[in-house]
Image (cartoon, grey):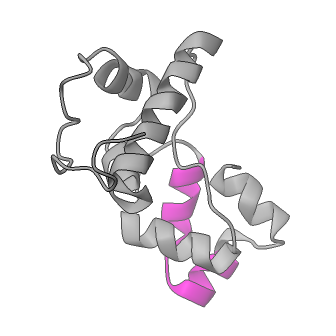
Amino acid sequence: MKTLRETRIDAGKTQLDIQRDIGIFQTKISREENGIRTLTVLEMKAIEKYLGAEIDWVPRSNLTANQHAKLSRAIFVMMHRYGSLETLKFTCRFRTLSEMYDVLCNNSETEEPLGLPNHTNNGGQL
């Protein structure tokens, strides 16, 4: 997946195009593209639909390759268990990957992520 900026440019759209066509202020889009969380989950989903692509909404950080792989696995498991919308709502709370890594990868495997329902979509099987 690509970032918002990369996806928007690939689609041939400007920040002002998004503002005009779906009503999300250009300033919010600019701030999001520069690493400041400003968009709601509904706005993120609207932008993805408008641009016709899934977007990587996670801010970048300086994780090692091993940490990034471990975090990617944790997010994959969350998406499998809770679905993409619940996972997106949860991961949007974090400003950096380092913060997300600390919460998702430094907890014991028996702990449920904060704010996610305590259930699985598949009976607990991966």
Viewer-side residue, 116 vs 81: 81
Q: From the image, which quarter does the C terminus lie in?
A: top left
Region in magenta: 16-33
Give me the residue at 29% from left, 42% from top: 124
Viewer-side residue, 43 vs 65: 65
Give me the residue at 80% from left, 62% from top: 9
Q: Position of residue 56 (x, y in %)?
A: 59, 49
Q: Position of residue 77 (x, y in %)?
A: 42, 38
Side of 68 where 86 appears, left or right: left
Give me the residue at 80% from left, 70% from top: 11
Is residue 80 depicted above or below 30 in this figure? above
Viewer-side residue, 108 vs 53: 108
Total labels drawn: 0
Q: Is residue 69 visible?
A: yes
Is residue 73 depicted above or below 39 in this figure? above
Viewer-side residue, 26 vs 49: 49
Q: Is residue 21 magenta?
A: yes
Side of 15 where 11 appears, left or right: right
Q: Is residue 40 visible?
A: no
Q: Toward which corner of the image does residue 112 lie, by quadrant?
A: top left
Give me the residue at 46% from left, 45% from top: 36
Q: Toward which corner of the image does residue 20 lie, by quadrant?
A: bottom right
Is residue 11 depicted above or below 121 in this figure? below
Q: Position of residue 10 (x, y in %)?
A: 83, 63
Q: Position of residue 41 (x, y in %)?
A: 38, 64
Kindly report the secondary structure that dominates the magenta region of the rendered protein: helix
